[in-house]
Structure formats: C-alpha cells, structure tokens
Amino acid sequence: MLNISLSSPPLKADKGLKNGSCNRGSCQEPGATFFNRSTKMYYCEDCAAKINSYAETKEYCMETFGSPELCVHDDGPYDLRFKPLPYLLKASDKSSADS
C-alpha cells in the first residue's frame, strides 16, 4: 500500500519577510529578496521567476504597474512593505528612499 502525505511543511516564522524564507508554503527557501507587488510579500529567485513567467501575470502587471514583472528584486535598505514616508527620513536617507 502506498502511503502519500498531502500535508504541507510547517510554516517558518520568517515566511514572506525580506531576506527571510520564501512566501510559497511549499518552498520556504531562505534568501527571499523578490517583492511581489500584489501579495506584498517576498519570494526566492526561483519562485519569483515562475510567478513572472505566467502570461496572465505579465498582462495584469502591464495594466496595473506599467511593467511586465509582478515580482521585483529588492536590494534596497528598506522593506518595500513598510517603505518610510519621505518626511520621516533624515536628509541623508531621502535619496536612497526615492530610488
């Protein structure tokens, strides 16, 4: 008799966070640096590439965000989910937050 488990792995505490574990429950690999502009969570490079490869995603993104990618690489100093408002930043930080 074949015994197959359909349960998902336990969710990691840093799932979907910047530089944490990938937001895909079946993946959860470390190093999530690709921000999904729809879910507002972070994904690993492999999962982000898969998400970006769907034709429906490209059409939706062009209409909604003006570019074809839903998941964008985030190597900036701020978590894109909580990007500070410009008036809260010191003058030296403003130029990096604007980019």
Image (tube, rainbow, N blue to C red):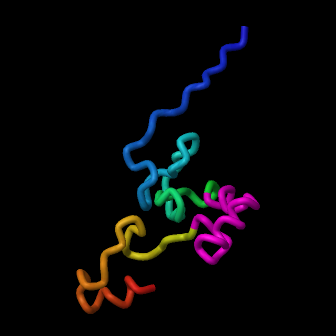
- Which image quarter holds the C terminus? bottom left
72 versus 6 height, above or below: below
Q: Quadrant of the N terminus?
A: top right
Query: Where's residue 11, x and y in %?
Result: 44, 38
Q: List x then y, in percent, for residue 48.
A: 61, 59
Residue 81's place in the image compared with 65, above or below, is above
Identify the residue shown where x is 73% and y is 58%.
54
Q: How many marks?
A: 0
Can residue 69 be found in the magenta stretch? yes
The reply, left or right, for residue 46 in relation to residue 93 is right
Which residue ends up furthest to the front in the rendered image? 63
Q: As rendered, which of 84 and 26 lies closer to the eye?
A: 84
Q: Main secondary structure of the magenta part?
A: helix
Q: Is residue 62 left or right of residue 23?
A: right
Q: Residue at x 39, y 68 (%)?
A: 79
Residue 68 picture quarter: bottom right
Q: Is residue 19 found left or right of 43 in the rendered image?
A: left
Q: Quadrant of residue 52?
A: bottom right
- Farthest residue in the right direction? 55
Q: Which residues are magenta?
A: 48-71
In magenta stretch: residue 79: no
- Residue drawn 58% across the image and 73% down it: 65
80, above or below 54, in the image: below
Would you identify the image quadrant in which residue 19 lies? bottom left
Residue 6 against residue 20 in the figure, above or below? above
Residue 78: x and y, percent?
37, 72
